[in-house]
Image (cartoon, grey):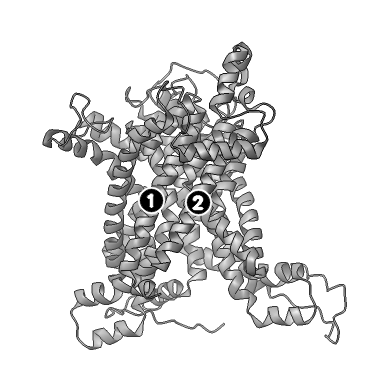
Amino acid sequence: MAEQPAPTQPILGAPQKPQRVDWRRRFQWASIIISHPQARIGLFIVVALILMGVFAPLIAPGDPNEFVGMPNQKPGDEFILGVDPLGRNEFALVVWGARVSLAIGFGTAALGMLIATTVGMIAGYFGGLLDDILVLIMNLFLVIPGLPLLILLAAYLRPSTATVIFTLAITGWAFNARIIRAVTLSLREKDYVAAAIVAGEDNLTIIFRQILPNMINLIVGGFIGMSIYGIASSTALAFLGLTNMEDVSWGTNLFYAQNGNSLLLGAWWVFVPSGFLVALSALGLAWINFGMDEITNPRLRAERELRKALKGTKLERVRATPVIRRGH
Amino acid sequence: MKYVLRRLGFYLIAFWAALTLDFILPRLLPGDPAAAILGPIGSRMTEAQINALRQALGLSDAPLWEQYIQFVTHVFQGDLGVSYSAFPAPVTQVIATGFGWTLLLGLSSLTVSVIVGHLIGIYGAWRRGSAFDVVMPPLFNFIGAFPSFFLALGAVYFLGLQFKWFPIAHAAEDSLTPGLTPEYLLSVLHHLVLPMSVAVLVNLQVWIQTMRNNMISVLAEDYITMSEAKGLTQNRIMFGYAARNAILPSVTGFGIFLGSILGGQVLIEQVFAYPGLGYLLVRAVGARDYPLMGGLFLGITVGVLLINFVVDILYTRVDPRVRAE
């Protein structure tokens, strides 16, 4: 990794040695995730789904919207997942659906976390009246029911991928902003922030150079959580027919399945794959976040390490979690 | 008391925010909102029809603040306009038909999922690493990962269509006249089972996860070790000492999830054609009935705020520190 550029302005009296960034320490969360069995499976699932979306033209060549066979045809040799009520190849729809569904999920997470991080850090760092107002806004967004608001917004806006991402981010940022604000509040009191203030650093530098890097794991965790929210909610919106219905996504697949009365006709193959993939991506992301939980709550990690250390020994039940310190 | 008043103040602000949103949204559309709403159909409508729509939306050439005051006054007079999909019924009347059903479904599923979820979380943390703990929380996590409408469709397909154990639509038998007759109430219960179970399955993981994590933290406290040393029965330690303290952060977090949980009910109501506010909302969107949409959004928000307020009052019972404040 490249060294951080040295501060351009010399600080009064401070020795001008560029700060060494301990990258191994800073990315410790990544190694914890990889060592966590559930998180590793989650990572595998998510990467596989992303690859499926990226390489959709190779996996299922041709236009997924093309009419290929008799509507509601059973899975067979020609169409391994059957045909949907509009006569489209279900396998191609499912593969191509990953593109829009995942793009909306990650897009929502990126935009939502941008809002959440900015608002949360401003509220927590500056405090006072500004904090009171921002907290009130966060609480309003939390208490006003999200999905009905989403439906209302979607009904007014022209449906497109961009507007869906925008509305999902607007309705979903508040939860993470609250967490980031709380952590900013406590980080603000740290000695190194006080030192930076004394050294005359301006607020923006302190926020971005001193506070933000210490919240990376929280932001990554929030990003993953919001991706789940984005995928699930956009699927719900599409199911209600409120997104761009010409897009192929898992949600629109389910919409056409429902509107083609597939269930009444017993055509389960039109429903199951798309719904299952939505669940699988949510699950994979949630599992990655279980690994993230162990970073923010060391007690959970200690528990796993304890179990590993005591593997094979029959043990009396221990109520409290002793923390094992490994030599670093 | 002070706590309850403060919360009440917050809910009033929240209500005002929802109201204002309702006012702003139609006016945010570029150009003439009425024309934008009508879209391609608008070109085929007469001037009089478009003017009627503008009036229904409360749009006029008056300055914005004047329109706003007029809008708010109308709302407080209980006038939310006239629905055009259920013409000539006023919006408030349509909301009134769905409000009770939404509260019934919301409160019953919430009660069941909170109780069951907390019990699973408590027991899982108590027997950490046991077969129960290894199977149950991940199982409900898996179920909760599915979209709620997908689970609802599954329930309709298997329990409704294949086994025919439960009715698949509406909140009661259509042939029965509503009333406090045992026949009618039984029918309501019978219709409630499926949508409620799906709502419970979807939400259960939230309560299991939070309670289990809280319990793990609480179980490490000294007073738990102390109570074991005193030789108290296991049940007493589990419920009287550990769970009782672990439940507090969970109740505080309650309000945060309530909006999303009750809002998510929209999809379940839609699949089961359960005549609550969510079902009506989706229908209003389909019919492009804008006055009704706005009114229903307000109605759902009021429902969520009401339940939140009830939870706040309960909270003062659970945590004596709030009362003492």
Q: Chain of mark 2?
A: B
- Callout 1: few (<14), some (14-19), or many (20+) C-alpha neighbours within 10 Å? some
Q: Chain of mark 1?
A: B
| Residue B6 drawn at (x, y percent) | 46, 63
* Residue A300 lies in quadrant: bottom left
Q: Which element carries disc 2, helix, strand or loop?
A: helix
N-term mark: 1 or 2: 2
Front position in the image: A7 or B269: B269
Q: Which mark is residue B84?
A: none
Name the amino acid type tagged 2: Ala
The residue at which mark 2 appears reads as: B14
* In this rendering, position of residue B230 left or right of residue A71: left
> Would you say the residues marked 1 and 2 are in contact, meaning their CB atoms lie under 8 Å apart?
no
* Residue B29 lies in quadrant: top right
* In this rendering, position of residue B323 left or right of residue A244: left
Q: What residue occupies the far left of the structure in this picture?
A: B182
Looking at the image, which residue is at 60% across and 60% down? Answer: A133
Looking at the image, which residue is at 34% across and 85% down? Answer: B222
| Residue B70 drawn at (x, y percent) | 56, 36
Image: B269 above or below B323: above
Which image quarter holds the C terminus of chain B? bottom left
Q: Which element carries disc 1, helix, strand or loop?
A: helix
